[in-house]
Structure formats: C-alpha cells, structure tokens
Image (cartoon, coloured by chain):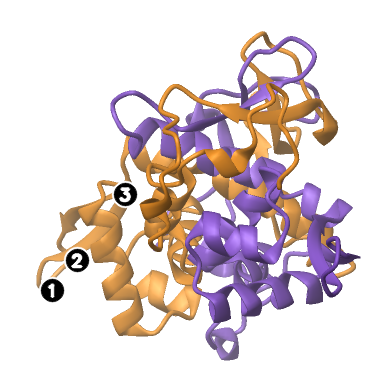
Chain colours: A orange, B purple
Amino acid sequence: MSSPRADGVPALAWSTDNCTVGRSMAILGERWVLVVLREVFNGVRRFEDIRDHGGIPRQVLSDRLALLVEHGILVRVPYRPEGQRERYEYRLTPKGFDLYPVFVAIADWGAKYVADPEGPPVEVAHRGCGAVVHAELVCEEGHLVPERRDVAPRPGPGVKPRQESSSAAR
Amino acid sequence: MSSPRADGVPALAWSTDNCTVGRSMAILGERWVLVVLREVFNGVRRFEDIRDHGGIPRQVLSDRLALLVEHGILVRVPYRPEGQRERYEYRLTPKGFDLYPVFVAIADWGAKYVADPEGPPVEVAHRGCGAVVHAELVCEEGHLVPERRDVAPRPGPGVKPRQESSSAAR
C-alpha cells in the first residue's frame, strides 16, 4: 500500500507503538511548551518575566513549567529578591539543552515561511565567528545532506513488526 | 531582569509580536500534526493508511490534514483504486519537505530520551553512504557547532522594540 523504503520494508509493516517521535510530541506537542522554551533559551527565566514577555496565561504557564520540570527538561532554582519572599527561576538541564536543534529547526522554517518581510526578530549566532546558525542534516560519516531526497527512513534497532491490535491512539 | 545576551541587549526588551517560533508553533504545535507528518515522511500517504497506522481518530486526522493543506505543507493528489471511487493521497510540498530538519531533530531527541532500551524503531539514513542522519547546528561559515554554549540568540533583522501593549497572547 505504501511506498517501499530504501531497504524494501514498507512503513505500514512497522509498529508505531514505540515511536519516539510520538512519545516526544506527547511532551512537546503543544504550542505553549515551545513558546515557554523559547523564552528560557533566550535567557528569560523567571515566572513573571516569562508570563509577561511570552504573553502566556498564568495557569497555562504554571502547568507547562510543571510538565517541563517533571520531564527533567527544566529545573527550578530558588532566588530571593531583596526584601521579598523566595521565588524561582527556571533553567535548562542537559536534556533541555538537547532540544536546541529542535528549537533552531523550527526557527529556520519559521524564518523562511512565516516571518514578516524584514525577516525574523531573533537569530542564533555562532559565538566563535558570529555567523548565523541553522539546523542541518549531517550523517554520522560527516556528510552534510542538504537535499531531502538523499535521506530515507529505515527500520531502526527498536523496530517491531506491526500487529493488528497495535492501532490504539499514540 | 534577564541575562544580557551576546550583544548586550536583554531579551525582555524584544517584542514577541512577530516571533517566528510562535507563529510556526501555531501551525505545528499540536501533537497530532507531527504524527501525521511522521506518517507522510515515512511514505504512508493515504487517508485510511495514515488513520490506521498512526492510530489517529478519523475526525482529528481530517482536521489536521485540512490544516496542513491550507498552509501549503501537504497537497492532496487524487487516485482511483481499481473499481472504486476516486480517493486522495497526501504528498509533501517543498514547504513540507523543509520540515525534515524539525522532524529529524525531534527524532534525535526522542532516540536519546524516550526510546525503549533497544533503541528507536526508525532511523533516517543518508542514501549516499548509508550512515544515520542527525540534525546538527551548523553556522553559515560552515562550522559544526556541537556545543550549545557556543551559540547565542541575538536580535535578527525583524526585531522590534517591545511596547507594553504588546503582551497579548501569542
């Protein structure tokens, strides 16, 4: 039914039960989650600052921060402003920093397709040389693969044959 | 309040009104959208096949496909199975193919953090050499930038100063 892949195994024969894109999107797949992460990646770390700058409703922000802390993407770090009660700021963990390519890939696509005519409001720069950074496809042999037709999905180490009972929502 | 960035402009001073991450996530920021795209990237293109293989409720799939067609990410292409009425399959446009780095970046993160012990069920290979492909940060001078601390956001060509009235939800 589907196109055969590079190695001749049709994708329809693979189970999606252990799909790591689906599992990732169960955490990340909500507009406000990436907007919260955008703020933290850009150095805006305190609840009131994130709420105000990101324009995020208070309860939504509280829920999303709790989710990101629960999944180990952010950690809550206490601080105490002069003369006030203790508050928290949110910092990226290594697991959170590893989302940087996701964030840059979304920003690249956005800059190309949904930016105002003058361009995107923010860009990410390489500290070493100052040039703008993008998310590019690179293979483990070190080849840059700019052409989408030069990549193909294939079953990975965790592939499972599909069973008819495996079509529950995921 | 926030950390000063590489060029000394605090992110809180930037407007988020024209943020291209926020605008992209208004299209993509929903779990099922990326699951639908996963199916199409993997060569599963027909409504019933996507619904069945992705485990996506019929109405959800219908809505998400309409959204992706409306935004020019997928196109509907008719086909007629032998002896049946005309049906449609969904193919990626160039705008859709340009989401491949987003998809690979999510899959990379998922393989590291949410995979079963044996690994991810699917991997993306470079057709030229067979090696697995990842989404990496590369600057426009061609430097691979594996270290997150070596990149920093800065105002882009479309940056706008923030106005107090600009804190509506976005």
Question: Quick check: do tags 1 and 2 share a chain?
Answer: yes
Q: Which type of secondary structure does the marked residue at label 3 adopt? A: strand
- Measured from the top left, where is residue B167 in percent x and y? 53, 85
On the same chain, marks 3 and 1? The answer is yes
Residue B156: tell me if it is visible.
no
Write down the residue under mark 3: A91
Residue drawn at x 78%, y 55% is B96
User: Residue at point 55% right, 87% down?
Assistant: B164
Q: Residue at x 61, y 69 (%)?
A: B22
Q: Which amino acid, mark 1?
A: Gln
Q: Which of B81 and B28 is in front in this view?
A: B81
The residue identified by callout 2 is: A81
Circle 1 — which element?
loop
Q: Residue A26 carries which label?
A: none
**Side of A118 relative to B65 (left or right):** right
The Cα–Cα distance between marks 1 and 2, rounded to whole angstroms, is 5 Å
Q: Mark 3 lies on which chain?
A: A
- Which chain contains the residue that carries disc 1? A
Q: Circle 1 sits on which residue?
A: A84
Amino acid beneath label 3: Arg
Q: What residue type is labelled 2?
A: Pro
Name the residue at 75% across, 28% down.
Answer: A151
Q: Which of marks 3 and 1 is in front?
A: 3
Separation (CA) of disc 3 from disc 1? 21 Å
Circle 1/circle 2 CB separation < 8 Å: yes
**Label located before the other in sequence (3 or 1):** 1
How far apart marks 2 and 3 lie (CA) works out to: 17 Å
Where in the figure is residue B11, as x and y percent of width and height?
54, 60
Residue A135 percent across, percent down from the top left: 67, 37
